[in-house]
Image: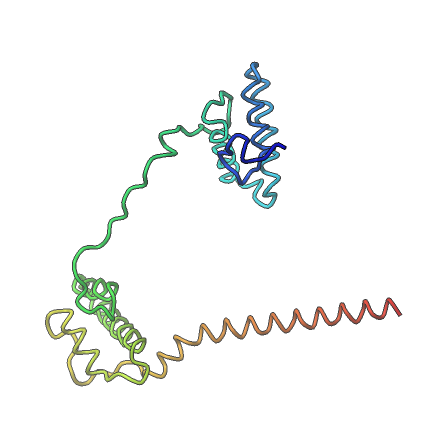
Amino acid sequence: MDYNTQRKKLLLPEYGRNIQSMVDYLLSIEDREKRTEQAYAVIDVMGNLNPQLRDVSDFRHKLWDHLAIMSDFKLDIDAPYPLPEREILHKKPEKIPYSEGAIKARHYGKSVEKMVAKIRELTDPEQRRALIALTANHMKKSYLTWNRDSVEDVQIIGDINSLYGEELIPQEGVALSNHKELLQKKNGGKLQHQRQNGQANSRQVRRNNHQQHAHTFRRK
């Protein structure tokens, strides 16, 4: 018996052994023009495995890259794209730079610190006032993520002044958005999404029932 475990290891198993056999046959063709012609035919077969992506330019580029990989980078053809090199395939990705420095208030996150720093840069009074109000209300909404009951405006004002390093908002005479309104805005998107899913499911159930009744009527 001939088992797959006894055969040559597939470089890209998702394409199967038949595609790999086609690629191996390409390497045996001596005429470069004919080899290129047959390579295009193999690409079409590979694209048939995902017909919904066959006409996407980036997807076809990926197919030619996969063809080069399955040929162990030995395929010499006139490809429409530059074929990758072995070194690029095994090259390790660069490390993602992480932000340095401790977050002063972790429950607000790093974005709030950036917003407070942006307030310091603004010179236009209207833009500055709008960003202050936006930042304070965002902090209040973030606070409600951990404390679902309520939060006093004086707490938020004290926190934003602490992050700013001086009095940015006076302790009196400033009213932020009501915590119930913030919670409604936060949960409104989820409720709307659930409502849309429920309506779609109801339509599907009615459609299935209609088809079932029609099928029963035809049988009678």
Report the residue at 22% width, 68% height from top. 106
Is residue 7 shown above or below 53?
Answer: above
On the rendered structure, is 17 left or right of 121?
A: right
Is residue 173 shown above or below 220?
Answer: below
- Residue at the outermost front position: 1
Q: Where does the image place residue 195, in percent across and percent down from the top left?
A: 54, 75
Q: Where does the image place residue 60, in percent across and percent down from the top left?
A: 53, 36
Q: Where does the image place residue 67, in percent across and percent down from the top left?
A: 51, 31
- Residue at the outermost left position: 166
Q: Pick the residue in front: 145 or 1.
A: 1
**Quarter of the rendering containing residue 211:** bottom right
Give the image's coloring scheme: rainbow
Image quarter hosting the N terminus: top right
Report the residue at 17% width, 67% height from top. 104
- Residue at the outermost right position: 220
Report the residue at 21% width, 62% height from top. 118
Q: Where does the image place residue 152, in percent across and percent down from the top left?
A: 24, 84
- Residue at the outermost top position: 31
Q: How many labels does the image show?
A: 0
Is residue 116 shown above or below 80?
Answer: below
On the rendered structure, is 132 left or right of 203?
A: left
On the rendered structure, is 39 left or right of 155?
A: right
**Quarter of the rendering containing residue 220:** bottom right
Q: Pick the residue in front: 77 or 56.
A: 77
**Quarter of the rendering containing residue 218:** bottom right
